[in-house]
């Protein structure tokens, strides 16, 4: 027995010493590599809006919620690619100088910034962003000039232009054989720009604007100064005496009168434009092409339906995520080159992969035509063809562009 006990003790110490020796000679496990960080800024001009209908009041997180959803999807892929995406949100007042807010985001390390700003605000930082190696993704501004004479090589446009929206609507009206239009437009600059886009679309697709009329903003308090009876009388009288027409087109981006037009016009005709049948980048009732999955996820996460600006912001975040994944890095120059190449595309629940136009960095995309409840149609319409992409029948095509990227 004593010999057995001694043998056991000897083997125990031998095992301890052997384990220690192996621990010293075995290669140490390498620490897990830290995920590459991709920081995305979100710079928005925000102030509470007054709309003609309480149902049209934009939610406080419009756009921001879409960006957060996009970041979440980026990180789902990023786990497998060794990448992590962060979002920094900054707000300024409309028409404020955005230079400081922009510089603050850059100081945090944001090299990709989603912007929901006016044209002057975007232009005030576009060249500064280019010099700092920062890419901007415009999700709110619809000005064609920002993609044309004022285009920049580092500004990508997710939001469709006014010309794209007008062309999408015009194609549908021509397909329906409703070619005679009356144009009612507001007195503010955005209204007049959309009216110009509708005139261009009429010329382009064979529509005929048989009459035009401007609705002047008299500065009333909208809801409080106008009772329903007064609105009914005012709109009916305003639309009296027009020549025969198929559709009344309305350009009222400023939300002064357009919502009041349907069902109050002198002649019983459909209304389209900024009221009635409205073109947009997204529709909260879209279910096709996997849209119901996106809608349900968004509703579950944010407690409301997804709006066009939410989809624009989600798409911008996914463009950055897709480019980072494909280039396996976070270098803005490398990612910019990839986004502008033939290899790039992004899926956005719209029935086809979306790409950027090389001549002005506008995202090609279908346009939804919807009323307050359903998607009525999606443009481009089938009869309208193009030599490379039917999506290029919407908006400024390459032979028409005034853009020189720099």
Image: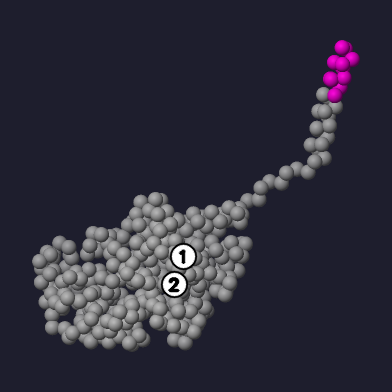
Please state the horizontal and vertical placement of residue 346, each as a whole percent of the image: 51, 67
The numbered mark at residue 348 is: 1
Question: Colour scheme in the image?
Answer: one colour
Residue 194 left/right relative to 133 = left
Residue 351 relative to residue 267: left or right: right
Q: Secondary structure at mark 2?
A: loop
* Residue at x 15%, y 62% (from the top left corner): 224
Seen from the viewer's position, the closer of residues 154 and 296 is 296
What residue would you read off at disc 2? 365
Quadrant of the image containing the N terminus:
top right
Say above or below: 375 vs 397.
above
| Residue 66 point in image, percent of width and height | 42, 59
Q: Position of residue 300 (x, y in %)?
A: 39, 50
- The crowd level at tag 2 (other Cα within 10 Å; few <14, some 14-19, many 20+) is many
Viewer-nearest residue: 107 or 154: 154
Choose top left, top right, bottom left or bottom right for residue 273: bottom left
Left or right, 186 with reference to 293? left
Query: Residue 68 or 47: which is nearer the viewer?
Result: 68
Is the residue 374 above or below the residue 208 in the image?
above
Disc 2, disc 1: CB below 8 Å? Answer: yes
Residue 261 appears in the figure: yes
Give the main secondary structure of the magenta stretch. Answer: helix
> In the rendered image, is residue 63 in sight?
no
Residue displayed at 43% across by 58% down: 294
Q: First in sequence: mark 2 or mark 1?
A: 1
Q: Residue at x 39, y 62 (%)?
A: 287
Asked if residue 9 is among those painted magenta in the image, a careful observer would answer yes
Estimate the x, y position of residue 30 in percent, counting from the top left.
71, 46
Nearest the viewer among 189 and 387 is 387
Q: Label 1, secondary structure: give it.
A: loop
Magenta-tinted stretch: 1-11
Q: Is residue 149 left or right of residue 212?
A: right
């Amino acid at each position: 027995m004593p010999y057995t006990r001694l043998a056991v003790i000897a083997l125990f110490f031998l095992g301890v010493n052997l384990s220690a020796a192996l621990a010293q000679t075995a290669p140490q496990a390498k620490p897990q590599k830290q995920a590459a960080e991709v920081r995305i800024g979100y710079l928005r001009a925000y102030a509470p809006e007054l709309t003609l209908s309480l149902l049209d009041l934009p939610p406080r997180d419009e756009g921001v919620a879409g960006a957060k959803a996009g970041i979440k999807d980026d990180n789902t892929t990023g786990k497998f690619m060794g990448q992590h995406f962060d979002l920094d949100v900054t707000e300024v007042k409309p028409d404020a100088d955005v230079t400081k807010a922009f510089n603050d985001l850059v100081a945090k390390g944001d090299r990709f910034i989603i912007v929901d700003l006016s044209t002057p605000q975007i232009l005030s930082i576009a060249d500064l962003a280019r010099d700092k190696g920062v890419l901007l993704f415009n999700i709110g501004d619809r000005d064609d000039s920002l993609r044309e004479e004022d285009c920049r090589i580092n500004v990508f446009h997710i939001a469709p232009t006014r010309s794209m929206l007008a062309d999408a609507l015009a194609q549908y009206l021509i397909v329906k054989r409703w070619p005679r239009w009356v144009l009612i437009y507001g007195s503010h600059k955005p209204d007049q720009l959309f009216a110009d886009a509708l005139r261009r679309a009429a010329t382009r697709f064979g529509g005929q604007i048989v009459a035009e009329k401007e609705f002047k903003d008299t500065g009333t308090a909208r809801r409080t100064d106008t009772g329903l009876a007064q609105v009914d009388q005012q709109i009916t009288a305003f639309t009296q005496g027009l020549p025969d027409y198929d559709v009344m087109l309305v350009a009222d981006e400023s939300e002064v009168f357009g919502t009041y037009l349907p069902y109050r016009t002198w002649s019983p005709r459909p209304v389209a434009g900024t009221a009635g049948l409205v073109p947009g980048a997204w529709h909260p009732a879209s279910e096709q092409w996997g849209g119901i999955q996106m809608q349900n996820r968004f509703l579950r996460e944010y407690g409301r339906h997804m709006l066009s600006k939410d989809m624009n912001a989600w798409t911008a975040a996914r463009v950055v995520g897709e480019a980072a994944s494909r280039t396996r890095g976070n270098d803005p120059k490398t990612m910019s080159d990839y986004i502008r190449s033939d290899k790039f595309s992004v899926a956005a629940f719209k029935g086809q992969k979306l790409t950027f136009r090389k001549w002005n960095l506008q995202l090609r995309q279908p346009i939804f035509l919807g009323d307050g409840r359903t998607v009525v149609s999606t443009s481009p319409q089938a009869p309208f063809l193009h030599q490379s992409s039917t999506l290029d029948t919407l908006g400024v095509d390459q032979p028409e562009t005034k853009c020189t990227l720099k």
